[in-house]
Image (cartoon, rainbow, N blue to C red):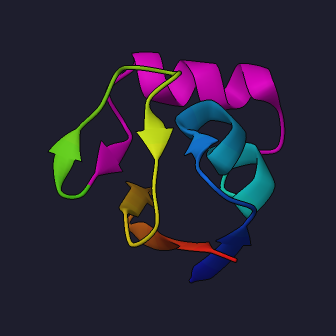
């Protein structure tokens, strides 16, 4: 799923909410801290990680591609 965001980047926790992967910030926080979120194929536990153009975020076997517009 392509997710269009404004430049220059978006933080991982915000990206999960904006993409619809998580309904709330608390849900996003728990998913990240629980090790359920992958960024470009690697587990990421940093809520504030900067997600840039082309990055792939995966949660629950669903992939979301960040597209900076």
Tell me where residue 23 appears, x and y as whole percent: 82, 44
Q: Which span of residues is magenta-colored?
A: 22-39
Quarter of the image containing the C terminus? bottom right
Tell me where residue 44 appears, x and y as whole percent: 29, 31
Which quadrant of the view contains residue 43? Answer: top left
**44 on left or right of 41:** right
Q: Please tell me which residue is depicted at 60% across the width and 20% down the height of the picture.
A: 29
**Image vertical order of residue 27 relative to residue 34, above or below:** below
Which quadrant of the view contains residue 20? Answer: bottom right
Q: Please tell me which residue is depicted at 51% across the width and 21% down the height of the picture.
A: 47
Front residue of 46 and 36: 46
Q: Residue furthest right?
A: 24
Q: Residue furthest left?
A: 42
Q: Please tell me which residue is depicted at 65% across the width and 74% down the height of the picture.
A: 3
Tell me where residue 22 appears, x and y as whole percent: 71, 46
Q: Please tell me which residue is depicted at 61% across the width and 53% down the height of the picture.
A: 8
**Image vertical order of residue 15 relative to residue 43, above or below:** below
**Image vertical order of residue 47 relative to residue 16, above or below:** above
> Does residue 33 belong to the magenta stretch?
yes
Front residue of 64 and 69: 69
The number of numbered discs placed on residues in the rendered structure image is 0
Quarter of the image containing the N terminus? bottom right
**67 on left or right of 5:** left
Residue 18 shows in the view: yes
Tell me where residue 4 appears, x and y as whole percent: 70, 75
> Does residue 5 belong to the magenta stretch?
no
Q: Residue furthest bottom?
A: 1
Residue 20 shows in the view: no
**65 on left or right of 2:** left
């Amino acid at each position: 799923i392509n997710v269009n965001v404004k430049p220059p980047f978006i933080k991982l926790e915000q990206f999960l909410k904006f993409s619809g992967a998580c309904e709330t910030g608390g849900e996003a926080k728990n998913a990240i801290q629980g090790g359920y979120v992958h960024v470009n194929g690697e587990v990421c536990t940093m809520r504030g990680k900067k997600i840039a153009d082309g990055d792939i975020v995966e949660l629950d076997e669903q992939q979301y591609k960040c597209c900076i517009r």
